[in-house]
Image (cartoon, rainbow, N blue to C red):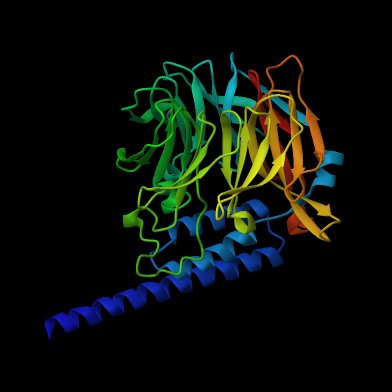
Amino acid sequence: MATLDNEKQVSTQQAEVIFLSIFQKLTVFKFLLYLQLQKSKEEEIKIIIEYWTRTLNIQFGWINDFDKLITDYANTAFMLDTFRSSSKLLNTLIGHTKYVHSIDYSTFDSGPFICSGSGDKTVSVWDVDNNKQIQSFDGHLDQVFCVKFSQYHYCVNHCNVVCSSSDDNTIRFWDIKSNQQLQIFNGYTDGVCGIEFSSFSGGRYLCSGSGNKTVRLWDVETSRLLHIFNGHEDAVWCVDMSPLQSNNNNIDKGNYIGVIGGNGYTVCSGSWDNTIRIWDIETTKQLIVLEGCESWIESVKYGSNQLVNTILSGSMDKSVRLWDIRSGQQIQVFNGHTDFVRAVEYSPLVVNNNEIGDSSNVICSGSSDHTIRFWDIRSNRNDLYVINGDKEDYGISCLKFMQLKKKGNCNKQKLNDDCSVYLCYGSSNKICVWG
């Protein structure tokens, strides 16, 4: 009898949690609609969306559909033709003394910021609005390959932290405000290349690729190594983690944080063995091997929203490739670069595609041939647009799109006109902002 009473009590508690979560999310959604009617700033809406989708991601999988609804509300499409006709080089951030390997973007303190990692062994943080370096960390003992802003530290501790990986065999976390190192992940026998935070659990988990041919999964909260994925035959240069799910129908297994985000989340890794591999986080098994590139993989990215079942890659064989995760096959190959493709990105831009009678997503690639090229994701014909970098540099090493509010009185404009697309890229020892 006591057991039955306990079960009833647990069921009642679960029902209360579900009801409270739905009520909270409905309240947030209504508030977002109110902000739109009042023509409030896009940045304010984005901050609210990010906060609630992080903090209210509870354990009942079907409720995540509401997260998807709220998150999609923030997505805005921009026409490539507008970007092409109006954009230009706006700023050049100079401070590194050697090659910039990686950049990332975040918004805090009401402004946009970029972090960067360089061959000069430093990690820098830049104030984009004021075009200046505000912080530099010099604790690494060798060149820095990758940098990311940590969503987890912001969500849990309300502090702005940069994570960096280096050829000194470590991953380090840096507190921007205090200018101190917070954490260090050791245990590698070779340099640490690409890193990426999880889309689930508020970015609590971090994956990394290394020169020792492994992919590793870390718990940022406990600094504990959770698993080592083995299978690549050469260095793992780049990694990515699958986007937040919204259609997990298995409620019993669900999206429980205790099983690292729940079933279905994956890591993809690009290697100098010319393959891209996909790993299941829950089962720790290798799921797919994507083959077809003729040289090292330099960049991999998961798609999101309607492109969630795709992976984009750039290779030293000069190609950009689009892959279908479900079939394990190549969908498109984009040729046009004349040197190594160092970076690829899904852009927020779209282009009118007359063949399908609809708009089509645009992807972007940066190369050692000093160009950034834009491609129609549904067509492997010639590039749509080319940005030419400085011929005296070592080419384009990294890319990052930013969506920033326009300066001036934005309240008199429509919501989708309140922000513009900016493209940041690393080239030799500087960072360029194009928009």
Q: Which residue corresponds to the image point at 46% horizontal and 43% vertical from the top-left?
A: 197
Vertical placement of residue 388 versus 279, above or below: above
Q: Residue furthest bottom?
A: 1
Q: Position of residue 215 (x, y in %)?
A: 41, 36
Q: Position of residue 261 (x, y in %)?
A: 39, 55
Visible residue check, residue 418: no
Visible residue check, residue 72: yes
Q: Which residue corresponds to the image point at 44% horizontal and 53% vertical from the top-left?
A: 265
Vertical placement of residue 47 versus 229, above or below: below
Q: Position of residue 431 (x, y in %)?
A: 66, 25
Horizontal relation, residue 49 to residue 33: left or right? left
Q: Position of residue 219 (x, y in %)?
A: 34, 43
Horizontal relation, residue 185 to residue 381: left or right? left
State the quadrant of the N terminus. bottom left
State the quadrant of the C terminus. top right
Vertical placement of residue 279 versus 31, above or below: above
Considering depth in this image, is 49 or 330 the residue closer to the camera? 330
Quarter of the image for residue 13 reads: bottom left
Task: Report how many numbered discs are placed on residues in the image.
Answer: 0
Considering depth in this image, is 327 or 9 the residue closer to the camera? 327
Q: Which residue corresponds to the image point at 77% horizontal and 53% vertical from the top-left?
A: 417
